[in-house]
């Protein structure tokens, strides 16, 4: 998670998208933004500065500008002097509204940048809010491989050397897409969505024991990779150990918590001869079925219970008597 | 080799949860475990097999256990059935 971004970063990264123009204070660009919220300072301008959230980016929309223009010179100076006493990170004026000369003067003196955009306040709030939320999103790193399997983001985890990269490679070979290997950066978006991506240096390379580093994008082409993917499932690969209990039916489902978001966890024991790639594909499709409302273990159990409840109970194997006459 | 007949007493019969419980216990022992019902014989360590018995309340099962730890295995299985799979 970013502790802060500078106003300069915000300007550079949004200059084109938000058509931002720097009106004044080059020095103000070094101020820090520590908060992803935006504030419209209507009340603060009119004099009520209690609870004024001055640490947020200030948006001056039609209302604020119209209000300032309605004041006489003395009132305007009084209002702005009080307002500009606070350590404001930056001011953005929407709708290309004309900016009162005195505001530009005080902002320059106080080293507070004023930016101007042609976008409406609503559009600006939406676009800038999205950008800031992304910048300040909580994030963590996980050791594992993230692969998009049939549109489901599967995070493969497990001890080093258990074969995560090999399975990722196998999945790519079968037409799935690698997001990141070894180091996966997971960010939380919109409170309940986890987005995983790789690092800038790694760029879809992975290490295969005995071979070294290979470049998946170069070998398999653009269809074998993607930049980021929602993390929807964790598949934890564990060494098979005799005597340990593993899930047999699938009625009990495990969950894992990442950044406060819970996602299903599948603990998969592996041993030689087991095709984990096909199992990973099956886990993805099974997850899709569940999201579409079909839960195989539940349906199976329902069928079994209904069967046992029937009055004229016919054992299953006798049901198939007719098959004896079927010579094919 | 030892054999024993038991009656399923829990209301909903041997559905997925009790079946899973049974194979978990069976899996802890080295002995071969067979379960018979109405002429159908299944491996007691296979979840699908055990569920295929479709053993409803009141039905009779026969456990056939063979191996070094057959007595312990039989005791554990019988106890589970008698305790109604800790369900009711």
Image (cartoon, rainbow, N blue to C red):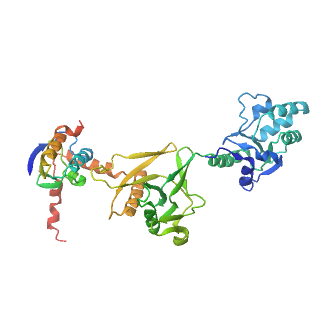
Query: Residue at coordinates 51% horizontally, 71% vertically from top-left?
Result: A220
**Above or below, A128 relative to A56:** below
Say which of B17 and A25 sits in front. A25
Q: Position of residue A32 (x, y in %)?
A: 72, 43
- Drawn side of residue A153 relative to residue B69, left or right: right
Q: Position of residue A258 (x, y in %)?
A: 49, 46
Using the rendered view, name the quadrant where residue A282 is placed.
Answer: bottom left
- Drawn side of residue A269 relative to residue A137, left or right: left
**Above or below, A1 relative to A288:** above
Residue A293 visible to the viewer: no
**Above or below, A101 relative to A205:** above
- Drawn side of residue A105 relative to residue A230, left or right: right
Say which of A72 and A110 sits in front. A110
Q: Position of residue A281 (x, y in %)?
A: 41, 61
- Drawn side of residue A191 relative to residue B12, left or right: right
**Above or below, A173 relative to A45:** below
């Amino acid at each position: 998670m970013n502790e802060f971004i500078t106003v300069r970063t915000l300007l550079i990264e949004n200059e084109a998208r938000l058509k931002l123009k720097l009106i004044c204070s080059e020095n103000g660009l070094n101020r820090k933004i520590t908060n992803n919220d935006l504030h419209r300072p209507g009340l603060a301008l009119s004099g009520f500065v209690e609870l004024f959230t001055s640490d947020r980016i200030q948006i001056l929309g039609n209302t604020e500008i119209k209000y300032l223009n309605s004041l006489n010179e003395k009132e305007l100076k009084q209002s702005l002097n009080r307002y500009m006493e606070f350590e404001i990170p930056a001011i953005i004026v929407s709708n290309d509204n004309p900016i009162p000369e005195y505001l530009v003067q005080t902002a320059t003196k106080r080293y507070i940048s004023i930016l101007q955009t042609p976008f409406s306040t609503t559009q600006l709030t939406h676009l800038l809010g999205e950008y800031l939320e992304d910048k300040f999103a909580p994030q963590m790193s996980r050791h594992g491989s993230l692969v998009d399997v049939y549109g489901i983001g599967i995070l493969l985890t497990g001890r080093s050397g258990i074969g995560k990269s090999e399975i990722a490679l196998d999945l790519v070979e079968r037409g799935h897409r690698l997001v990141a290997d070894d180091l996966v950066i997971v960010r939380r978006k919109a409170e309940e969505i986890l987005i995983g991506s790789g690092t800038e240096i790694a760029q879809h390379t992975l290490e295969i024991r005995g071979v070294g580093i290979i470049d998946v994008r170069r070998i398999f082409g653009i269809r074998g990779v993607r930049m980021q993917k929602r993390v929807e499932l964790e598949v934890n690969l564990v060494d098979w150990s005799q005597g340990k209990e593993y899930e047999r039916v699938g009625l009990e489902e495990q969950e894992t918590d990442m950044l406060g978001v819970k996602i299903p966890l599948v603990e998969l024991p592996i041993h030689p001869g087991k095709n984990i790639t096909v199992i990973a594909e099956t886990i993805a499709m099974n997850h899709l079925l569940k999201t579409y409302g079909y839960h195989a273990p539940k349906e199976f159990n329902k069928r079994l219970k209904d069967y046992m409840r029937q009055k004229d109970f016919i054992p299953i194997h006798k049901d198939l008597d007719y098959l004896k006459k079927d010579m094919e | 080799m030892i054999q024993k007949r038991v009656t399923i007493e829990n209301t909903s019969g041997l559905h997925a949860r009790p079946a899973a419980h049974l194979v978990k216990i069976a899996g802890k022992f080295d002995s071969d475990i067979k379960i018979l019902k109405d002429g159908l014989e299944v491996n007691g360590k296979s979840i699908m097999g055990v569920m295929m018995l479709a053993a409803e309340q009141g039905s009779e099962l026969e456990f056939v256990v063979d191996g070094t730890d057959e007595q312990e295995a039989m005791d554990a299985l019988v106890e589970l059935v008698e305790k109604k799979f800790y369900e009711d």
